[in-house]
Structures are given as C-alpha cells and as structure tokens.
Image: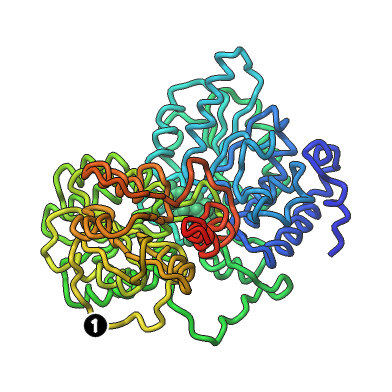
C-alpha cells in the first residue's frame, strides 16, 4: 500500500507539521500498516484499530512528551508507538529483544507510564497531575485514555473519586466501544448504553463526581476530536471526554468478530481471514480442559459455580456460561470482587471455581488472605496462564503465584503436570470433602494428553508421584514443566518425581528421596525465590539433610517478552538447558 503520508512521519513533531486535511488519509495508512504487520507477527489488533483517530488527535493537540499521555492496559497503544519514533521497529513488536506490546518507560520518553494490567491510568495520571501542581507547573496536561471495560474496575473508580475533589489538570478519555476482550458487563455498561442512546441525559455519573463531562462524540471523526480536545485544553480542573469507537475499525472481520480479533494470531492481511486449524490432532489447551470439565461436573453437581473477572473466552468459562448462565458469572475486570464473591458463595455451601489468570490474581491478594484463607473457606482458585506466558511479557508472566500463595496458611496449592491431572483435581475439588481453599495453577497453551477425557479419579491431596527411576540424581518438578524434564532425561538414568503439590508437601516421599539421592534438582516455572524450590530447601533445612540441592526456575529479575520456548531457555528450564545442567552435575 502507498504510505506516502506515514512515510513522512516519525514522531509527533512531524505529525503536528501536517495540514489537518491529511489526517484522515494518515489514519487509513496507519490502519494498513498495523494490519500488515500484526497479520504476520501477531499481537493485539482490534483495540489499536479502534483508536487510530484518537491517537492522531491526541498527539496533534497535546505537546507530547511534555504533556503526559497514559494508555490504560496499553494493548491499544500500537498507533502511539508508531507515531512516537518506533515505526521502523514496529515489526519487532512482542518478539524477543524487540519492542514491548505495551507502553514501557524504558522504551520511550513518550511512554510515560508502564501498563499491561488494566485500570491504573487514572490514578497514575492523577499522581502526575498532583506532582505537576506541587512543582508549580500549571501548564502541563495529563491525559488518561481508558476503555469501557477497564473503567468499570474498582481501581479506576478509586482514581475518579479522588480526582473529583482536586483541581488538577487531568483529562480522562473514555474510549467506549462497548466491549472488553468479551462484551462488557454490568450496570455501568448499561448506563453507558443509555447515555449513548440518549435515554440517560441527566444525572451524569461523571459530572456528579465533579468532572467537566463532554460527549459522547464520534471517536472516528478526527476533526471533531481535535476541536473538542482544543476546547478541553482551555478548561481548568478534572475533565472527562466520552468518545464512541468501534473495536477493529477498518478491517471487516475484526469489526464483525471483535472477540476473535482482539488478538487473532496470524491472519491474511488482505482478506482478514484466519487460516484453518491444522488437521493433525493436538493435545487440548489447558483452559479448554478446565472449561469443558467444569460443565461436565456442573451437570451432576448443582452447587458448582463458575466465576471469571472479564476473561470468559481466555479462561474457557464461556462453556459454562453458555450452558448454565445462572451459575457462571463474568464480573468484569474485578479480580478483588471475584475472590470475595466466591468467598461469600462458599459460606453458603456453594462450590465456587474462581478462574483468574495468575498475573491478575496479584490484584486480589488481600481478598485471598482476609476473605478466603483466614476463614478457611473452600474456594477453588483456578490460576490459568501460570508460568512464563510468552509474548505479553513482563507484565503478564504468571511466575509469582507460588511465592505469594505459599506463605498463606490453610491454602492448598496444586500444579497438575498434564490435562488428566488437571481434570482429576477439578473433580476432586467438588466432591464436598474439601475443607480448605485450593489453588490449582496451570499454564497457557496445550499440554501433552490427546486422550484427556478419561474417567475421573480422585486425587490424594499432597501426594507426589515418581515418573522415572534412575540413580544418584533425583529431579523434582512441579506442574507442566515435567514435560521438559521428561525430554531432558529421555536417555539419562536420572530419577524424576512430579510433586503435584507445593502445599502440603509430600513429606514421606521427600524423606525417601533425600535418603536415597545425593543430588537433588528442583524445577519450576515460577520464581526461585519463595517458590517450589524454596519449599524443598526449607524441608531440607528443617530435617538437617546434607544433600546437594539445586533449584532451577525464574531468577530474581523481570523476564521480557518472547516465545515461551525462548524464555524457558533463557531462564534455564527448557529441556535442552535442564539436560545440560544434569550432565554437568554427572560430570559428563
Ligand atoms: C487487571 C487486569 N485484568 C484483566 C486484564 C485482561 N484484559 C486485557 S484487555 C481487557 C479488556 C479491556 O477492555 P477495554 O478497557 O474496554 O479496552 P478495549 O480492549 O475495548 O480497547 C482485559 C480484560 C488485564 N489486562 N488486567
Ligand atoms: C491485554 C491483555 O491483558 C490480554 O489481552 C492478554 O494478552 C490475554 O492473554 P491471553 O492471550 O493469554 O488470553
Ligand atoms: Mg472496550
């Protein structure tokens, strides 16, 4: 495609030198540029396509980077990246050593705040705005762009609540496309629909919170946005601009199938079509084993409840939401609420399966401790995307859960090594015998078992298993990483144990292991500090064992983006690196 305007623009200064009449054509070229690259390199598509005009207008009107612009979540910041010095690197987006898929302070002076987890933008922009006031800078503008799903989160409301009693130079822009990854939910969504359709004209929520509200306006009319931003620039105090956009704008399939084209993987840049799945059989995704098994169990057990904070498709809870809409809830981006909601249900004899990505559960830490564990309520946490997740990178790796959960009294922590063990854990959790909360962590992607839909078998809580018999060295793995270990020691005479639980530990098995093997290696897809290896080290120290113990896992640093294979290799838990480590110990 002819990118004659985009070719002349590397940064916002170039953009501001452009005559306004060229901006609609620039918008077209930007869309094409993004589609062409994301079609082959993959990434988040729909959100960026929806904010092309808004991004142009923001950099056109405001004096970025002196004026401060924050993108909530940041998955919609591709246009921003392209217009701020990163056009020529954009094809490295989300790849190892390439640019990040999210705004990142160390990457660009235009990325004023790192994002990835949602609903932080209002608090961060308000913090900057208050700091500007204290510094005596009353000219600087502070802009937070937040989506309709992200603004419904508690944290966003905390920011609005505070901002409304300040006189800071803060502009919150609500990019309302009526969808998150899945359709937005809740009373606020209904309220916004009423505002858009004109049913709700009075008692504006944002005005009630002391914001100067304007909108809703068409977020694809670049001239209208520019003139409204120019007007808002002259108004003092907190301001709120409501714009209406279409997620996936400019690519027919992406507009029509917004859930799939949120992050579609590879697709045809011209037709928009996604290639058919390979016909060869492959093991199922862990998320589908969770989702389908839960429906199977819910068919027989009417106490089962499913809960997801805004990830019905990603977690596959959608299967239960379709089958049992009265017993499966998408609560929006509200991890804290999801956990306490589950706790409340457990007090009434329900069996709540609260499915939250490992990285997003970080937000609900107090709720896990205070509302669930302290009252010893048998909530079942299903932690999807545990371990290194790949291209989303440092903001999304689910590597901290073992460390942050292991110190919580009463909590049982399990990590199935394949789809069948996940299935059996889910089955065991709903038998009514559970008197503690249980966390089950499993990774993004596929496991190993083609024939996973086998008859259920109860799992003994806290029991490990031996997978391979060898001599002198024992490898203890936790969860799905057992697969890498199995490949690594395929032709070595090394013992392999899959421990299955990090809490409680199988102490009988551990005593056998420590009495039998001189060298013990632990392997986990999580942080070494505080994780599974630490638990084994604590066991060793408690019982005074003198064996040599090596703990492999994620080191004490934030891991960037790349494929899961690349990242596992970097941290030393790929099959290749495990094998090299074992051979070194064997002096081979
Ligand atoms: C705390 C947290 N929970 C869940 C997510 C996963 N997530 C990423 S984008 C998204 C939807 C965001 O929707 P919206 O704010 O409306 O932005 P849009 O994609 O429509 O532009 C969700 C749920 C997240 N990033 N952070
Ligand atoms: C931006 C964001 O937080 C989500 O879109 C996330 O990238 C989803 O991850 P999965 O692709 O693993 O569902
Ligand atoms: Mg949205």
In-front residue for pair 549/351: 549
Mark 1, secondary structure of its residue: loop
Question: Where residue 348 sits in the image (x, y, percent)?
Answer: 11, 55
Question: Where residue 344 sits in the image (x, y, percent)?
Answer: 18, 50
Instruction: Please name the colour scheme applied to the rendered image.
Output: rainbow
Disc 1 crowd, CA 10 A, few/some/many (<14, 14-19, 20+):
few
Q: Say above or below: 462 vs 14.
A: below
Taking the spot 83% from the left edge, 45% from the top edge, the residue there is 9
Residue under pointer 1: 455
Give the farthest residue toward the bottom. Answer: 279
Taking the spot 74% from the left edge, 73% from the top edge, the residue there is 270
Q: Say above or below: 106 vs 355.
A: above
User: Could you tell whether 573 is left or right of 423 in the image?
Assistant: right
Q: Quadrant of residue 84?
A: top right
Give the total of numbered labels.
1
Taking the spot 30% from the left edge, 71% from the top edge, the residue there is 421
Q: Can the viewer see residue 339 in this picture? A: yes
Q: Say above or below: 363 vs 552.
A: above
User: Could you tell whether 29 is left or right of 107 in the image?
Assistant: right
Image quarter hosting the N terminus: bottom right
Q: Can the viewer see residue 179 in this picture? A: no
Q: Quadrant of residue 58?
A: top right
């Amino acid at each position: 495609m002819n990118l004659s305007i985009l070719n002349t623009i590397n940064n916002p200064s170039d953009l501001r030198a452009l005559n306004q009449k060229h901006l609609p054509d620039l918008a077209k070229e930007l869309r094409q540029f993004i589609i062409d690259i994301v079609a082959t390199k993959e990434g988040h598509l729909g959100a960026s396509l929806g904010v092309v005009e808004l991004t142009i207008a923001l950099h056109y009107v405001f004096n970025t980077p002196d004026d401060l612009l924050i993108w909530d979540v940041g998955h919609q910041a591709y246009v921003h990246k392209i217009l701020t010095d990163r056009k020529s690197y954009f094809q490295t987006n989300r790849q190892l050593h390439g640019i990040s898929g999210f705004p990142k302070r160390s990457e660009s002076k235009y990325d004023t705040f790192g994002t990835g987890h949602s609903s932080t933008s209002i608090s961060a922009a308000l913090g900057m705005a208050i700091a500007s006031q204290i510094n005596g800078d009353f000219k600087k503008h502070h802009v937070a762009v937040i989506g309709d799903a992200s603004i419904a989160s508690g944290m966003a409301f905390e920011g609005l609540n505070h901002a409304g009693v300040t006189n800071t130079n803060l502009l919150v822009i609500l990019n309302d496309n009526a969808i998150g990854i899945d359709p937005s939910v809740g009373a606020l969504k209904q309220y916004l629909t009423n505002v858009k359709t004109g049913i709700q004209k009075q008692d504006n929520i944002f005005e009630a919170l002391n914001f100067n509200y304007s909108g809703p306006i068409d977020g694809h009319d670049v001239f209208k946005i520019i003139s409204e931003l120019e007007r808002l620039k002259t108004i003092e105090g907190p301001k709120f601009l409501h714009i209406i956009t279409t997620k996936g704008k400019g690519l027919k399939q992406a507009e029509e199938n917004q859930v799939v084209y949120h992050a579609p993987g590879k697709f045809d840049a011209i037709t928009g079509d996604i290639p058919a799945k390979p016909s060869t059989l492959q093991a199922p995704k862990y998320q589908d084993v969770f989702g389908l098994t839960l429906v199977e169990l819910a068919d027989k057990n009417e106490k089962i409840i499913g809960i997801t904070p805004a990830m019905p498709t990603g977690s596959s809870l959608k299967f239960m939401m379709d089958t049992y809409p009265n017993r499966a809830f998408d609560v929006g981006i509200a991890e804290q609420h999801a956990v306490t909601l589950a706790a409340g249900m457990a007090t009434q004899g329900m069996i709540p399966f609260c499915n939250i990505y490992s990285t997003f559960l970080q937000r609900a830490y107090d709720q896990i401790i205070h509302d669930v564990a302290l009252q010893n309520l048998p909530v079942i946490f299903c932690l999807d995307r545990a371990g290194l997740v790949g291209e989303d990178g440092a903001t999304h790796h689910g590597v901290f859960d073992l460390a942050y959960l292991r110190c919580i009294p009463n909590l049982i922590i399990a990590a199935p090594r394949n789809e069948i063990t996940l299935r059996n854990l889910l089955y065991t959790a709903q038998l009514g015998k559970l008197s503690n909360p249980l966390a089950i962590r499993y990774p993004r992607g596929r496991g190993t078992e083609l024939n996973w839909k086998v008859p259920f078998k109860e799992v003994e809580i806290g029991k490990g298993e031996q997978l391979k018999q060898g001599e002198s060295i024992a490898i203890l793995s936790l969860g799905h990483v057992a697969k890498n270990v199995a490949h690594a020691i395929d032709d070595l005479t090394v013992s392999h144990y899959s421990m299955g639980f990090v809490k409680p530990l199988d102490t009988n098995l551990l005593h056998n292991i420590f009495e039998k093997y001189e060298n013990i290696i632990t392997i986990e897809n999580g942080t070494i500090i505080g994780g599974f290896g630490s638990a084994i080290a604590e066991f060793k120290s408690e019982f005074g064992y003198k064996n040599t113990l090596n703990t492999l896992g994620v080191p004490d640093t934030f891991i960037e983006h790349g494929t899961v294979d690349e990242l596992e290799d970097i941290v030393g838990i790929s099959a290749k690196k495990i094998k090299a480590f074992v051979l070194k110990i064997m002096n081979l």
